[in-house]
Amino acid sequence: MFEAGSKSPHRLSRPLISAFLFLYLMIQVLLPWRHLLYKGDVNWTREGHRFAWRLKSNVVGGVMSIIAVDPSTGQITPIIPFDDISPEQYVLMIYTPDMLLQYVHYLKEKLEKQGMKNPIIKVDGKISVNRRPFHPYIDRNVNLAEEKYRLFSSADWILPPPPDL
């Protein structure tokens, strides 16, 4: 059935399975530590927080408003996120920066399809960590529609935490 010196299909698949298993295990070990790659306190920035091996006992709440500005006319349009997402998604989005950026990019595409060229989308967000007073979280002067998602570097549009955090 096999010629002398040829490898069986089972012998060829072992290195492939071993490589896949090694890669899978490395992801499972390293992914929870990625929050160490971001600058700032992960309790505030929330970057790298998901899937982390951290005690997630913080109570986080927030408020947020979103506006879109048509650069050609200067017209300001308040955005009502509930037209696009559920209340549960909205609550998570307030303090999850990558989710917020994803929604803003979706919103940019939606507004462009409606005829607004290069919309400027700004967010005014404040959060409270562990029932402390609300503190500005998002730089409301930044056009988030132009910001790119960066996997392992901090978002410049997240403001520094309050001193008492």
Image (tube, rainbow, N blue to C red):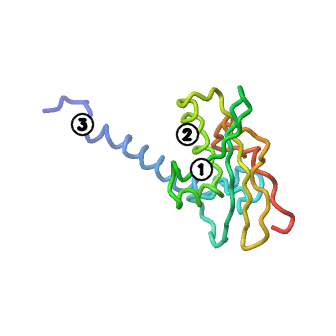
Decide: is 104 above or below 134. Answer: above
Q: Element at badge 3?
A: loop
**Going by the image, does 133 lie left or right of 149?**
right
Dot 1 or dot 2, earlier in sequence? 1
Q: Tell me the CA gap for discs 3 and 1.
A: 61 Å
Find out whether the residues at labels 1 and 2 contact each other: C-beta distance under 8 Å: no
Question: The residue under label 2 is which amino acid type?
Answer: Tyr
Q: Spatial distance from mark 1 to mark 2, Cα to Cα?
A: 13 Å
Give percent across and percent down for residue 32: 59, 57
89 to the left or right of 59: left
Tell me if residue 112 comes above or below residue 133 in the rendering: above
Residue at image mark 1: 80
Which of the labelled discs sits on residue 26, or is there none? none
Quadrant of the image occupied by residue 142: top right
Residue at left 80%, top 67%?
Answer: 165
Marker disc for residue 106: 2
For disc 3, the marked residue is 8
Residue 146 position within the rendered picture, expressed as x and y whole percent measured from the top left: 68, 34
